[in-house]
Image (tube, rainbow, N blue to C red):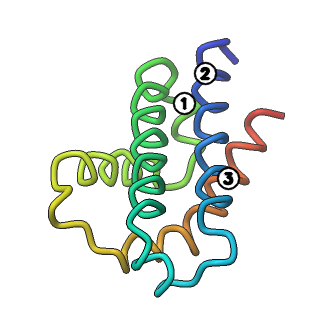
Amino acid sequence: MQLECKKLLHDISQATQKVSRFIDQKNFVKYTSDELVKSAVERQFEIMGEALNQLAKVDKSVAEKITDYQNIISFRNILIHGYADIDDRLVWNIIEIKLPVLSLEVKNLLT
């Protein structure tokens, strides 16, 4: 695997870990009422999506090993360009269901 791929995967891994730390001990209500945490979480999703976008350009075969990588990139675009219409329930659902999968897949690719 190319060094650039490893760097991008590392960036994704770091972002997933940050989201996990940011939402630790929080439920949906606490998440939605904490503007700072919401903003921080959304920023980390932007980083994940952009890193995946770059990864797909550098080595698409590696990006394709990540479940729903194209949807993650699309979610990043929604966060960036449709920021006024972000659905907190969607973000929370991604945190609970999709983030653990992404984190594990990236970890496996790095090892």
Crowd around label 1: few <14 · some 14–19 · many ≥20 (10 Å): few
- Give me the C-alpha separation between circle 1 and circle 3: 18 Å
Ranked by sequence position, the earlier of labels 3 and 2 is 2
Q: Is residue 59 above or below residue 49?
A: above
- Looking at the picture, tell me which residue is in the foreground, 30 or 104: 30
* Secondary structure beneath label 3: helix
Q: Amino acid at mark 3?
A: Ser
**Residue at the extreme top:** 3
Ranked by sequence position, the earlier of labels 2 and 1 is 2
- Looking at the picture, tell me which residue is in the foreground, 83 or 36: 36
Crowd around label 3: few <14 · some 14–19 · many ≥20 (10 Å): some
* Secondary structure beneath label 2: helix
Question: Residue tagged by mark 2?
Answer: 5
Crowd around label 2: few <14 · some 14–19 · many ≥20 (10 Å): many
- The answer to whether the residue labelled 1 contacts the one labelled 3, judged by CB atoms less than 8 Å apart, is no
User: How far across and down, in percent of the image, does residue 51 sit?
Assistant: 47, 32
Q: Amino acid at mark 1?
A: Ser
Ranked by sequence position, the earlier of labels 1 and 3 is 1
* Secondary structure beneath label 1: helix
Q: Quadrant of residue 34?
A: bottom left
Question: Residue tagged by mark 3?
Answer: 103
- Give me the C-alpha separation between circle 3 and circle 2: 16 Å
> Is 12 displayed left or right of 35 in the figure?
right
